[in-house]
Image: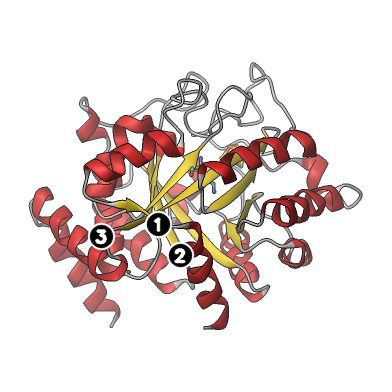
Amino acid sequence: MEEQIKNTLTSYMHLAADELYAKARDARNSAWGNKIFVYGFLYLSTFCKNNCAFCQYRSSNEQEERYRKTLRELLEAGKRLADDGVHLLDLTLGEDLYYTSEENFSRLEEIVSELHRQLGLPIMVSPGVITKGQLQKLQKAGANWYACYQETHDHSLFAKLRLNQDFTVRKQARLDAKDAGLLVEDGLLTGVGEDNDILLYSIEEMYREPLAQVRAMSYVPHECTFPSTAGDTLEERREHELKAIALMRLLMPQRLIPASLDVDGLEGLAMRLNAGANVVTSIVPSGRGFAGVASKELDIDNNNRSVFAVRKKVEELGLQIAAQSDYAAWIKEQNTL
Ligand code: MD0
Ligand code: SF4
């Protein structure tokens, strides 16, 4: 079985890129039809205790002006996203000691429960590694999803990316979330020196984990992060991300796979959907000072990270944004599996 997965992935990897993407699109269309889901993104606190080598919010970046949004601001922004038609709200934060402390954790629970109650949308939380008890509390507060990205399943590359973090603890957090009744997402960071073997191995590992959503996102270099080693053209720099999207789709046709606006903005959407993605993530409300993670400002205040702009692109590709009720029905079905 193990060998078989590896051989299948290797044979796909050797296809010409266009052929690979066409196969991945076929697999997506058979599993999901022409329907695409869209996720709203609220980066609610940019404080973080970690020092990931690839991230501009790393603790050693003292230049970064950090923010923590109030419940009111979150409700207002969440309402705009809900009215625009997003299917889910992703509440993301750095590993912010304020929220993870015992005394303030209830504030995070309150944010989840109020957004869930007042807006009626499914909620994803991306708070980094938290305890099993905390995961249970967020689930009770109304969260449906927990996202926590390993970035790579290769131990030595992980150590270079997530400095001073524990590989196994991070992986365990996803398993704990699954036990707590949450749907779980893992993600890979590409363009950080992984070779083909590491990329394929990471995809196999994601296949083995009980994940409902799997993603790949390219590294976006910043002044305070390590230098990029990737190629010259956009396509070259995105090669591993697009291949990963297609390979994940072929190996895991029924799982959700994002095309993130957080790497190349709206311009990069078509190539990711054409590689087999079926969810558009990182839709951010404009004019409210909310940031992206990989690309802090790209396409936010010009409204390009809106449902409106995304709908136009999606339809140009012969695809359609699903109804909010379709996504809610999918979530319901997962809970009864
Ligand atoms: C995204 N910036 O979707 C977000 C983020 C966290 N769950 C998601 C990495 O691109
Ligand atoms: Fe913190 Fe997340 Fe950035 Fe790492 S990737 S430094 S955990 S915000």
**Which residue is outermost to the right?**
103
* First along the sequence among labels 3 and 1: 3
Q: Secondary structure at mark 3?
A: helix
Res. 326 mark: 2
Q: Are marks 2 and 3 in contact (CB under 8 Å)?
A: no
- Residue annotated with mark 1: 322
Label 2 environment density (alpha carbons within 10 Å; few <14, some 14–19, many ≥20): few
Q: Residue at x 72, y 41 (%)?
A: 75
Q: Secondary structure at mark 2?
A: helix
Q: Quadrant of residue 6?
A: bottom left
Q: Which one is nearer the viewer's eye here, 67 or 79?
A: 79
Which corner quadrant holds the N terminus? Answer: bottom left
- Residue annotated with mark 3: 247
Amino acid type at mark 3:
Leu
Q: Residue at x 36, y 28 (%)?
A: 228
Above or below — where is 268 with respect to 289? below
Res. 94 mark: none
**Location of residue 327 in the rendering, given as x and y in whole percent from the top left corner:** 48, 63
**Coloring basis for residues:** secondary structure
Q: Are marks 2 and 1 in contact (CB under 8 Å)?
A: yes
Q: Residue at x 45, y 62 (%)?
A: 213
Q: Secondary structure at mark 1?
A: loop
Amino acid type at mark 2:
Asp
**Which residue is outermost to the top?**
63
Q: CA distance from mark 2 to mark 1?
A: 6 Å
**Location of residue 232 in the rendering, given as x and y in whole percent from the top left corner:** 21, 25
Question: Quadrant holding ligand 2?
Answer: top right
Amino acid type at mark 1:
Ala
